[in-house]
């Protein structure tokens, strides 16, 4: 009787993949239940008007956010072109809170367009600028924590992240380092100089 190798272990499912279908099912049941409760209390026409109003408002919000994103993109492109023509490096763009939270504004518009009262309430909350900025800051910190936890010390990714921490603009200036405290001897004419590239 031969014993083989133990069967490979199946990869562990993440919590998100486990609970997301259940959360979606609960959300759909709650949306349908709330719509029936409101329809019984106020009538079907009121529910229809709420759903149509949410869809129209959501489309307007998404259109506004899309225009703002396109304006930000074209402005950044024009600045980069002007910097390239003048021969200077473009500066790191300052992060504008309104521009950074544009994705949450689009998400709010999308939630308003989805039929349902809970999604409409969450979409209306995302239209409030203070809530969008708080969510944006929380998301940025969470992503930075996840990225720093995923980086193994000593890897190329770790070196890149350390360089970005010390130089937030990310500019790299190539050249030769000359230390004043090191003794300098005479340089032989045959010794090549290291290349300096712009």
Image (tube, rainbow, N blue to C red):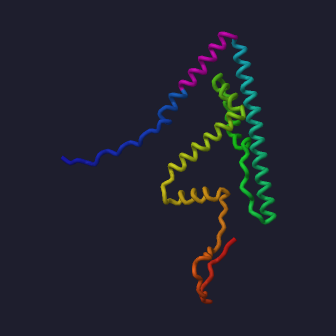
- Please give the name of the residue rendered at 71% of the width and 48% of the height, measured from the top-left corner: 95
**Callout count:** 0
Residue found farthest to the left: 1
Residue at x-position 63% and y-position 74%: 176
- In the picture, the quarter occupied by the C terminus is bottom right
Residue 194 lies, with reference to residue 174, above or below; the image says below
Quadrant of residue 160 within the rendered picture: bottom right
Q: Nearer the viewer, residue 174 or 3?
A: 174
Q: Position of residue 93 (x, y in %)?
A: 73, 53
Within the magenta stretch, is there residue 198?
no
Q: Position of residue 157 (x, y in %)?
A: 54, 57
Left or right for 45, reference 186? right
Give the magenta part as a residue range: 25-42
The reply, left or right, for residue 2 in relation to residue 60 is: left
Question: Magenta span: helix, strand or loop, mainly?
Answer: helix
Q: Where residue 47 sits: x, y (%)?
A: 69, 17
Q: Quadrant of residue 54?
A: top right
Closer to the camera, 105 or 96?
A: 96
Image-quadrant location for residue 179: bottom right
Q: Nearer the viewer, residue 188 or 66?
A: 188
Q: Is residue 108 above or below residue 118?
A: below
Task: Name which residue lies at 55% across and 46% down.
Answer: 145
Query: x, y (%) of residue 181?
Result: 59, 76
Residue in view at x 46 percent, y 38 percent: 14
> Left of 85 or right of it: where is 121?
left
């Amino acid at each position: 009787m031969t014993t083989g190798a133990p069967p490979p272990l199946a990869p562990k499912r993440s919590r998100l993949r486990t609970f997301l279908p259940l959360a979606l099912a609960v959300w759909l049941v709650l949306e349908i239940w709330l719509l029936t409760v409101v329809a019984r209390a106020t009538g079907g026409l009121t529910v229809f008007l709420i759903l149509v109003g949410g869809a129209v408002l959501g489309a307007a919000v998404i259109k506004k956010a899309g225009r703002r994103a396109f304006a930000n993109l074209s402005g950044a492109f024009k600045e980069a072109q002007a910097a390239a023509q003048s021969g200077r490096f473009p500066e790191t763009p300052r992060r504008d809170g309104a521009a950074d939270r544009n994705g949450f504004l689009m998400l709010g518009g999308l939630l308003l367009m989805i039929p349902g009262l809970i999604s409409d309430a969450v979409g209306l909350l995302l239209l409030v600028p203070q809530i969008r900025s708080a969510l944006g800051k929380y998301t940025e910190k969470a992503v930075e924590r996840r990225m720093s936890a995923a980086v193994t010390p000593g890897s190329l990714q770790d070196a890149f992240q350390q360089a970005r921490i010390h130089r937030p603009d990310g500019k790299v200036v190539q050249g030769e380092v000359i230390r004043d405290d090191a003794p300098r001897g005479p340089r032989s004419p045959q010794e090549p100089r290291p290349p300096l590239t712009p």
